[in-house]
Image (tube, rainbow, N blue to C red):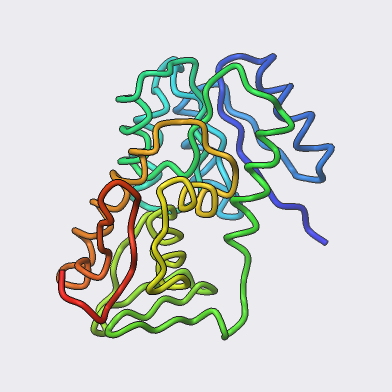
Amino acid sequence: MEKIKILVVDDESRMRKLVKDFLVRSNYEVLEAEDGEKALDIFFADNSIALIILDVMMPKMDGWQVCKEIRAYSKVPIIMLTARTDERDELQGFQLGVDEYIAKPFSPKILVARVEAVLRRTKGTSKDDVMTVGDIVLDKAAHIVTIGGNPVELSYKEFELLAYFMENRGIALSREVILNHVWNYDYFGDARTIDTHVKKLRSKMGEQGNYIKTIWGMGYKFDVDTQA
């Protein structure tokens, strides 16, 4: 069976080796890049890369620029690594379509667990995973969402968030519950992260964005039976 391929991008050779060693132990194939320019060269030359682990602070081209370039062509899952913990940096990452955001220092075992969680959610699924609510059709296997027959471009995390809402239609969900399920791990950051994603998801869904109801002081509920 062919190994899943991951691109690790970091200008620190020791960090790349640490991450690579743990990923190889978990039976992944690892490609390495020491700067943003090389990362793009490798990524666009190899269409079998399943996930990118991307450092923010790098020479020649930083992680934000790399992310923008990749997102213009691909929705491959991206995990950002950074030594900076400013909330604005984290929000910027999510707005660019980053799927996970991990601050240094971190546990390599936790990083591998998050890699596995993201890849689990990107694997093919059965026909039963095509969900329809009103005019919204979400196909998990093809990773496609249409509204009224028109495709809707969503980031990986926005897609997962909508899928979770549709699966739990009519159920009040706290921000903490949403984060723990959609991000698939105990999230210790600011729960307002979910608000940023919901706002972007609503705007992309047009009128159907009103299906996502705000429950003040708690979280959200996906409900098509009542008006916003």
Q: Quadrant of the N terminus?
A: bottom right
Tell me the residue at 23%/84% (across/down): 148
Tell me the residue at 28%/44% (across/down): 196
**In the depicted view, which residue is nearer to us: 208 or 72?**
208
Residue 43: image location, x then y, percent: 52, 43
Tell me the residue at 71%/52% (across/down): 4
Give the quadrant of residue 207. Answer: bottom left
**In the depicted view, which residue is nearer to us: 165 or 47?**
165
Give the quadrant of residue 223. Answer: bottom left
Q: Residue at the front extreme?
A: 217
1 left or right, relative to 140 = right
On screen, 168 above or below 108?
below
**In the depicted view, which residue is nearer to us: 116 or 161?**
161
201 left or right, relative to 79 = left
Residue 7: image location, x then y, percent: 61, 38
Tell me the residue at 36%/39% (across/down): 193
On screen, 139 above or below 82?
below
Give the quadrant of residue 192. Answer: top left
Residue 120: image location, x then y, percent: 65, 58
Residue 114: image location, x then y, percent: 63, 42
